[in-house]
Image (spheres, rainbow, N blue to C red):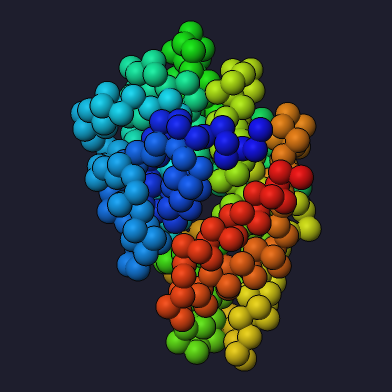
Amino acid sequence: MHLTEFYRGKKVLITGHTGFKGSWLCKILLDAGAQVTGYSLEAPTQPSLFELLGLSERMDSVKGDVRDLAHMQEVFARVQPQIVFHLAAQPIVRTSYEEPVYTYETNVMGTVHVCECVRKNPCVRSFLNVTTDKVYENREWEWGYREDDPLDGYDPYSNSKSCSELVTHSYIRSFFNQMEVAVSTARAGNVIGGGDFAKDRIIPDCIRAAMKQEAVMVRNPHSIRPFQHVLEPLYAYMMIAARQYEDKSMAGFYNVGPDDSDCITAGELTDIFCEKWGEGQSWFSPKQMENQPHEANFLKLDCSRLKAVSGWRPVWNIETAIGKTVEWTKVWRDGGDLDGCMSRQIESFMEEAHV
């Protein structure tokens, strides 16, 4: 069965649906015929992909804060979802230094609240908590982190997502193992793609500079990250949720990242962007940036477990991923058909992933 066919008619609830990844996921599921409910704050950026696509007109979009347990419980009770994707988070490392309390409230207690709603609603058969590659204790290793390596993120964002993992582990042992629901977590690397307007992310920064016909400023050009197109982890999330829905033994803790050849430096990533964008685009790195908060220099994931268990493989390499991002951005810049552009990209990706 093609993956999207599984979701036809399924009741799916997504937290954080107005964000970048959430918007892509909503479109995929809506196009597949799923009954989608979203629970999230207003779109976190202006412009926002969610609003550009008019997704609120196609789904049950609920304005809600994951810190509000009572409201979330009302939504779960009304919707009776079968599948839950928990994407809601404060996702920016630098913001977590500025607002650590809000970051922990959202990323830790938000996860507690979602777990509690799943516990109290036996309609849920499959639950996936989306975390990050930054949950691991970073030792600046040259090799990828595995799922059984210690969890201990450094900064408030990374650490709060480590805590989110631990909350989920506890609920699995204490409650979910005695229930019909299958529960997994997915630790994904850095995502790129059309429609990401967040601050302090390398590709959105590149796009903002290119739109102004300015050189891109790269803070940490030598930092290595597992960059991947947003469709890579979303496909993995959907696959994990579908397979554990049908077979609870498929549940687990999974890394989702690119092949080693696509774990490149921020400088190399920007080089590719400038080439794909054209128009004489360039970048620079300041000789010294003072008062910069700590960020890891080297991050890589070992995705052997997901590959072995499910046969999953990355589909698009980094050059293709950036090319697709530039394609989307220029369609948006020129007032073109964004929905059609995304549909073509999704269809192309799904066909290649299905081979």
Residue at position x 61%, y 37% in the image = 3
On the rendered structure, is 300 left or right of 86? right
Is 242 in front, or is 278? 242
Total marks drawn? Answer: 0
Q: Up-down: is 48 above or below 331?
A: above
Question: x%, y% of residue 178?
Answer: 48, 8
Q: Vertically, is 198 above or below 188? A: below
- The picture places residue 63, in percent across and down from the top left corner, at 24, 45
Q: Position of residue 31 (x, y in %)?
A: 48, 47
Between 251 and 352, the one lying in front of the other is 352
Q: Quadrant of the C terminus?
A: top right
Residue at 64% over, 23% down:
250
- Residue 309: image quadrant is top right
In the rendered view, does 134 fall on the left or right side of 64? right
Of residues 35 and 83, the one nearer the viewer is 35
Instruction: Locate the N terminus by quadrant.
Output: top right
Residue 195 image point, x, y percent = 46, 64
Whether 69 is drawn above or below 120: the answer is below
- Asked whether residue 235 is in view, the answer is yes
